[in-house]
């Protein structure tokens, strides 16, 4: 089933990581998983280190290792502001944060791609 695409921007302190239309954004907040579709109600969420998944048209899924940050949804547009956002293939080892959280890439598979493991 085709979903309506909507614009998403993913930004880090270094600049734009992704900018384009997606069918769905899914990630983890400090209180649990969240999925955002087009025309979602306004939302501001605190993001935990996790896997960020951008579901593109045609079934493709772009995956990133996401650091801490924020997700803002307003006026049918999503903005992901995060400390780090790295493609799994670019991660050599665990990413550590000052508060002791670790975001690592495991060698296993998760839906056909690298598995991201978050240890708290």
Image: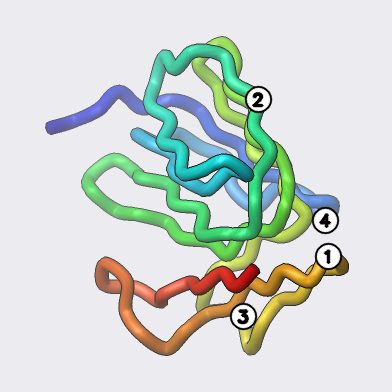
Q: Which residue is mark 1?
A: 99
Q: Earlier in the sequence, mark 2 or mark 4?
A: 4
Quick one: 96 or 113, which is closer to the camera? 96
Expressed as whole percent of the image width and height from the top left, the position of residue 38 reads: 39, 21
Q: Check residue 44 in the rendering and tell me which mark sits there, or answer none.
A: 2
Image-quadrant location for residue 93: bottom right
Above-or-below relation of 114 to 54: below
Q: How many marks?
A: 4
Question: Residue visible at 82% across and 56% down?
Answer: 14
- Mark 3 or 1: the one toward you: 1
Q: Quadrant of the C terminus?
A: bottom right
Quick one: 95 or 1, which is closer to the camera? 95
Expressed as whole percent of the image width and height from the top left, the position of residue 54 reads: 43, 47
- Mark 3 or 2: the one toward you: 2
Q: Earlier in the sequence, mark 3 or mark 1?
A: 3
Residue positioned most to the left = 1
Q: Check residue 14 in the rendering and tell me which mark sits there, or answer none.
A: 4
Is the residue under label 2 in contact with that under label 1 (CB below 8 Å)?
no
**Label 2 Cα crowd, 10 Å radius (few <14 / some 14-19 / many 20+):** few
Expressed as whole percent of the image width and height from the top left, the position of residue 65 reads: 58, 64
Q: Report how far apart the C-alphas of labels 4 and 1 lie in the structure.
A: 21 Å
Q: Report how far apart the C-alphas of labels 3 and 4 lie in the structure.
A: 16 Å
**Label 3 Cα crowd, 10 Å radius (few <14 / some 14-19 / many 20+):** some
Q: Check residue 91 in the rendering and tell me which mark sits there, or answer none.
A: 3
Question: Residue visible at 48% across and 72% down?
Answer: 116
């Amino acid at each position: 089933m085709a979903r309506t695409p909507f614009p998403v921007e993913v930004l880090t302190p270094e600049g734009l990581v992704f900018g384009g239309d997606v069918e769905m954004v899914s990630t983890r907040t400090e209180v649990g998983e969240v999925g955002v579709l087009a025309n979602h109600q306004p939302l501001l969420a605190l993001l935990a280190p996790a896997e960020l998944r951008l579901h593109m048209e045609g079934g493709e899924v772009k995956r990133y290792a996401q650091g801490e940050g924020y997700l803002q949804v307003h006026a049918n547009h999503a903005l992901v502001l995060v400390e780090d956002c790295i493609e799994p293939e670019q991660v050599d080892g665990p990413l550590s944060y000052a508060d002791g959280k670790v975001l690592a890439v495991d060698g296993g598979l998760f839906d056909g791609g690298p598995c991201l493991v978050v240890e708290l």
